[in-house]
Image (tube, grey):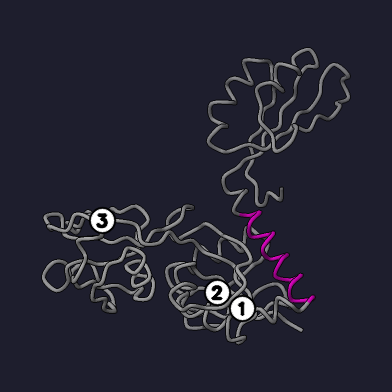
């Protein structure tokens, strides 16, 4: 028995392979191949467009896959959403589908889209958004280069953005957020009911989530005199409590903890000032809460 896993080809491919590597799965693929090699003989990965993965998972051609919430909604795929995996090609934060118009457009609110023409790759998502606003507009599919179509060809676009910088560079103004999206691990419902496949998918989910959590954290270890231990513990955060180990010198202990990477820069000088010695900061591959 094996688990057929859909992996996104294109902009998310490299970041997905890097995430798999941090989770402990070595994955590689030739430049012209759609069938990566994975060092788990129980998993059969296949590369395809993220837009198509939910549809094939729902149909049972794939047992599981990685795709965005946007494409799950767009294809109306009936799948099990196993877990969120917030990563993208450029950052570790959700991306947004937004309504954008020309900077000098008279359209100031979603209500002003009434009767207008909108271009987008996510037609179903956009229509659901407009229906929720009580707005009727013409929504057409865009094959790409969507930003260039405003204002000569369409009145507005719905486009994916992480920072908004590309829209601003094209003299466009964000009007509203249509959908916030992130990558999800999804499963076919029949596969999820299979005990072996479910366990395999749950293990994959745990390791991928652990790799994402570790990407934002580091480990710190240090030597501390017992006389300074209380002051040191008061300074350092930990997932639960720091680990304290005895040293051969009974007057000293080793202290180890995990914390957000952004905290380490300011904390290390404070620890040194409070008496910690031999402070070592190290990266983490996975953090499993």
Quadrant in the picture for the N terminus: bottom right
Which quadrant of the view contains residue 145? bottom left
Instruction: Give the main secondary structure, helix, strand or loop, of the magenta stretch.
Output: helix
Residue 145 in view (yes/no)? no
Residue drawn at point x = 71 percent, y = 28 percent:
222
Judge left or right: residue 118 versus residue 185.
left
Q: State the SS at label 3.
A: strand
Q: CA distance from mark 2 to mark 1?
A: 7 Å
Residue drawn at point x = 58 percent, y = 86 percent:
59
Q: State the SS at label 1.
A: strand
Whether the residues at callouts 3 and 1 have beta carbons within 8 Å, the answer is no
The segment highlighted magenta reads 195-211
Residue 9, x across and y down, in percent? 47, 75
Residue drawn at point x = 22 percent, y = 54 percent:
168
Q: CA distance from mark 3 to mark 2?
A: 32 Å
Residue highlighted by disc 3: 175
Could you classify mark 2 by the number of other residues whose Cα lies within 10 Å: few (under 14), some (14-19), or many (20 or more)?
many
Residue 275, x across and y down, in percent? 68, 16
Inspect the magenta stretch and tell me whether residue 209 lies in it.
yes
Which quadrant of the view contains residue 224? top right
Could you classify mark 1 by the number of other residues whose Cα lies within 10 Å: few (under 14), some (14-19), or many (20 or more)?
many
Residue 38 in view (yes/no)? yes
Does label 3 or label 2 sit earlier along the sequence?
2
Residue highlighted by disc 2: 7
């Amino acid at each position: 028995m094996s688990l057929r896993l859909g992996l996104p080809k294109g902009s998310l491919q490299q970041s997905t392979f890097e995430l798999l590597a941090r989770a402990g799965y070595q994955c590689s693929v030739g430049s012209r191949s759609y069938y990566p090699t994975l060092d788990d003989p129980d998993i059969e990965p296949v590369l395809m467009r993220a837009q198509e993965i939910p549809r094939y998972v729902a149909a049972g051609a794939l047992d599981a896959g990685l795709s965005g919430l946007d494409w799950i909604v767009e294809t109306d795929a009936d799948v099990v959403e196993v877990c969120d995996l917030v990563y993208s090609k450029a950052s570790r934060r959700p991306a947004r589908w937004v309504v954008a118009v020309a900077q000098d457009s008279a359209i100031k609110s979603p209500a002003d889209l009434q009767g207008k023409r909108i271009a987008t790759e996510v037609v179903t998502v956009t229509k659901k958004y407009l229906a929720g606003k009580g707005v009727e507009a013409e929504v057409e599919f865009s094959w790409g280069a969507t930003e260039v179509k405003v204002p000569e060809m369409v009145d507005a676009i719905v486009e994916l953005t992480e920072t908004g910088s590309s829209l601003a560079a094209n003299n466009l103004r964000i009007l509203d957020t249509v959908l916030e999206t992130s990558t999800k691990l999804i499963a076919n419902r029949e596969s999820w009911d299979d005990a072996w496949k479910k366990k395999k998918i749950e293990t994959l989910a745990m390791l991928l989530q652990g790799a994402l959590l570790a990407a934002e954290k580091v480990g710190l270890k240090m030597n501390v005199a017992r006389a300074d231990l209380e002051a040191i513990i008061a300074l350092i955060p930990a997932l639960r409590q720091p680990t304290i180990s005895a040293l051969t010198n009974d007057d000293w202990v080793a202290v180890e903890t995990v914390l957000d990477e952004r905290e380490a820069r300011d904390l290390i000088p404070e620890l040194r000032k409070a008496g910690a010695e031999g402070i070592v900061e190290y990266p983490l591959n996975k953090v499993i809460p």
